[in-house]
Amino acid sequence: MAKQEDVFKTIVAHAKEYGFVFQSSEIYDGLSAVYDYGQNGVELKNNIKRYWWEAMTMLHDNIVGIDSAIFMHPTIWKASGHVDAFNDPLIDNRDSKKRYRADVLIEDEIAKIDDKINKEVAKAAKRFGESFDEAMFRQTNPRVKEHQEKRDALHERYSNAMNANDLAELKQIILDCEIADPISGTRNWTDVRQFNLMFKTEMGSTADGAMEVYLRPETAQGIFVNYLNVQKTGRMRLPFGIAQIGKAFRNEIVARQFIFRMREFEQMEMQFFVRPGEELKWFDFWRQTRLKWHKALGLGDQKYRFHDHEKLAHYANAATDIEFEMPFGFKEVEGIHSRTNFDLSQHEKFSGKKIQYFDPELNEGYVPYVIETSIGVDRMFLSVLCSAYEDQKLEGGDSRVVLHFPAALAPVKCCVMPLVKKDGLPEKAREIQHRLRFDFTCQYDEKDSIGKRYRRQDAIGTPYCITVDHQTLEDGTVTLRHRDTMEQQRVAAADLESLLRDSVSLNSLLKKLL
Ligand code: GAP
């Protein structure tokens, strides 16, 4: 079986070769942790965003959307705590002059121990075959027990240091674990320092006295500062939500795993405003609702898990991540946070404006509490891409690479192909494509053999290929080829819209959510 690392490399290469994701500024040797979406990538990304947007704003009467600016008044970031506390702990190696995140170096060390344990377990599973009792083996095998104890002790020490913001202890852990710089191979480390992740720039000319502004590190604050505008103009009553999709920017130091951790990325965030005291009920509601949204895609229920936060930010009273099983392990794709009234109260304090809701049922005013759902578009894209990819062995020794995208998210829904480039077949195929493109993203392809054309569409995840042959001219039927089963069906060309519509429309996905 191919190693997961190799599988991931193959997926990244495929994403480039088939126009999904390109390195930014590639002809200038690239810009690290910044990516561009190509002709197929942008369609997939737009479909993901539509699925989220419509699930939020169309299926909930009490959720509306906004689109706030990336630039905001710099005091907003003081109020939100980002100026003072949006930091990563950094460490430099004096020999390689490379900079690392201290927490990532330690987490990698923990992952190495996990790998050792997993290798022991895999070896034993192979040796004992069907009679293998994994739980018993983990509890009793001396080597596994030793690794596990070492891992747990390291994890506890690391969590304590992170929770206490103890930078000296983080450095000491790196020294005690004898972690070496992967480039220089030395342990010549500087002290650990905090590094703010926000990008700064200037607004206005210097002669006027330019104002220092930030590129927003999350879209959420654009929602908080518009809370009153939306509540008043939309005559919204609690509980209600405001949704937004937009770019966010973070000067990530350790940027890796392709589009998993980027410096410019996109978020889909929704802030749900509730009556104080009801927030945990709503937290639970959104936890379940969001998981259902993910699972409706059919990528595999076992690929999701919740990771409840043990250590909460001082203003939060509950938080969980929805993690997805990527080729490099279970990773956070979405966060759901009960943020109390922290953000709105901070903006009240820093702006001097009253941000309250008058509750007609209680006959009193208060600052609403907030449940936030925050998902990265790019991470969602990566989870869809990774789970869709298959290098499939076919009968007869043949193989194909196919992307099993949920049909509603596929960049191209169908491709019309004339069997040969003569006898009026191209004209007929064009006629059908021109009709279908009003309803679906529909391509036309007449180049190469029909087999090669099918493979090209499989590689970009097109659910349906429609082949026009001589029989089409006689009886108006075409061959409809299904991507996943490769099954071919003879159908009337006139019925194509109705045959395809249900399977490729977002509606069918959205209906699963109710
Ligand atoms: N408003 C809350 C917030 O921003 P977060 O956990 O920092 O919370 C939310 O980010 C989501 O944004 C994450 O679950 C992830 O999907 C995405 N995200 C965060 N940083 C990212 C990065 N550097 N690259 C890509 N996606 C990122």
Image (cartoon, rainbow, N blue to C red):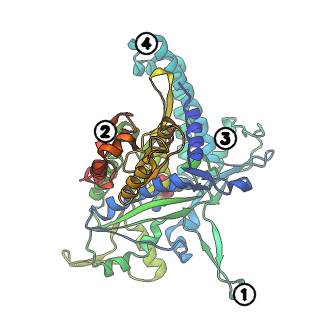
Q: Is residue 59 left or right of residue 345?
A: left
Q: Earlier in the sequence, mark 2 or mark 3?
A: 3
Comes first in the chain, label 3 or label 4: 4
Q: Nearer the viewer, mark 1 or mark 2?
A: 2
Q: Is residue 71 above or below residue 270?
A: below
Check disc 1 and give the amino acid type: Ala
Q: Please tell me the numbered disc located at residue 129.
A: 4
Residue that badge 1 annotates: 207
Q: Viewer-nearest of labels 2 and 3?
A: 2
N-terminal of the pair, mark 1 or mark 4, is 4
Residue at the disc numbered 3: 174
Q: CA distance from mark 1 to mark 3?
A: 47 Å
Where is residue 251, by image quadrant? bottom right
Quick one: SS at disc 4?
A: helix
Badge 2 element: strand
> Is mark 1 in CB contact (under 8 Å) with mark 3?
no
The residue drawn where x is 51% and y is 33% is 152
For the point 72% across and 37% down, the residue is 180
- The quadrant in which residue 299 appears is top left
Sequence-first tag of 1 and 2 = 1
The answer to whether 491 is drawn above or below residue 286 in the figure is: above
Q: Amino acid at mark 4?
A: Gly
Q: Which residue is mark 2?
A: 490
Q: Does residue 454 appear anywhere in the picture? A: yes
Q: Which residue is more in the foreground, 44 or 373?
A: 44
| Dot 4 alpha-carbon crowd within 10 angstroms: few under 14, some 14 to 19, many 20 or more | few
The tag earlier along the polypeptide, 4 or 2, is 4
Q: Compared to 512, does 277 lie above or below? A: below
Q: Is residue 315 visible?
A: no
Residue in the picture at 54% in, 30% down = 114
